[in-house]
Image: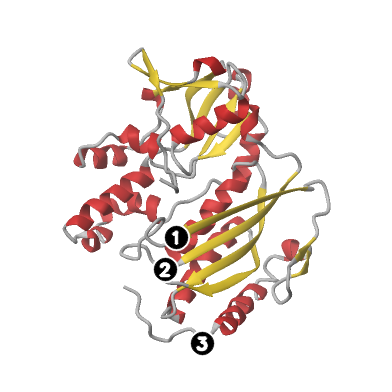
Amino acid sequence: MIKSKNKINGEFELIKKISKKIYSSKDKKPSLWKNVLKGIGDDAAVIKFPGPNNRLFVTTDMIVEDVHFSLLWSTADEIAMKLSESNISDIVAMAAIPRYAFLSMSIKPNTSQKFMNCFMKGLMRSFNKHNVLLLGGDTTKGEKYVFNLCLLGESKKGKFRSGAREKDLICVTGTLGDSMAGLNLLLEHKKNNSYTKLLHDRSKKSLLQRHLQPKSRTAQEGILIGKYATSMIDVSDGLASEIRHICDESSVGAIIYYDKIPISLKTKKIASMLNSNPVDYALYGGEDYQLIFTIDKDDINKLKKKFKNFKIIGEIVKKKIGCLLSKNGRLSKLHKGGFDHLT
């Protein structure tokens, strides 16, 4: 529970403290700062994008208290890291490099300076990992915490959802369903008020962190995969939802191999304990921030020589076939599912 000790002394004082921390990084990131003509302190930031990477990629993501995170088990730095990594994942999925960020916040009137320091620590940890600069934003107050990040990235070409072609293979990095497994475990323990004990259970820590501290793939990985992929998307709302996005944008269909969906042993154990299906976590959970991509069969081995952490999970087919799930030799319709913010 957040206490109101050492309350923030106004919006401008908060901005001043954030600005001081941001500008202290100038010497550490000279290659990024050299393109900043104007940072925090004016009505707008000014950035130039010279050189070969002259395509600007822009994304924005919002996270809301009790929708995307719970203060019962998420710390301020974890909230910030989730906000950052989800945005960075969008840029990485475009085979682009994340560069500059703008943060807008609606914070509670009794928010402590300790909470905001912790939040900024988590944000900067993620930004420093991915070499991102914070250059501005906005603040206001509200009954619940709302954080929004706008992120700018750059690339020479980029990669889109719309390039999948018939006979392409469908691949995914890492494992899926881990974040949903962690969330369901927390929700189950919330019923008997034992989630605090769960948070200190070392045997469950790594799985819980996949939900509380999700990590994006790196820009280097996204660019490398993008050289061979025909289309790409990140897993924010679940495998089923993301496959449909690719099919809709590329005017194709897809068949997903049920038994090929990569699921970790820990997620399987949690699903068994909760009497649920781990494949459903992968298909309809989300917040795994892995990369789904389509690729020509002839390019698979070329990619494997440079990047091995992916599995083939399906194939692209004609649009009229639709989106199907193949299990034990039988085909069934791939339900839409996935997380929907408006339902």
- Alpha-carbon neighbours of circle 3 within 10 Å: few (<14), some, or many (≥20)? few
Residue 72, image x, y percentages: 31, 64
- Alpha-carbon neighbours of circle 1 within 10 Å: few (<14), some, or many (≥20)? some
Q: Judge by depth and name the residue closer to the eye, 188 or 245.
A: 245
Q: Are marks 2 and 1 in contact (CB under 8 Å)?
A: yes
Spatial distance from mark 2 to mark 1, Cα to Cα? 8 Å
Spatial distance from mark 1 to mark 3, Cα to Cα? 23 Å
Whether residue 309 is visible to the viewer of this picture, yes or no, is no
Does 83 appear above or below 252?
Answer: below
> What secondary structure is found at the residue carrying circle 2?
loop
Closer to the chain start, of discs 2 and 3, is 3
For label 3, the residue is 9
Quarter of the figure with residue 157: top right
Quarter of the figure with residue 251: top right
* Quarter placement of the N terminus: bottom left
Residue at the right extreme, as displayed: 51
For label 1, the residue is 64
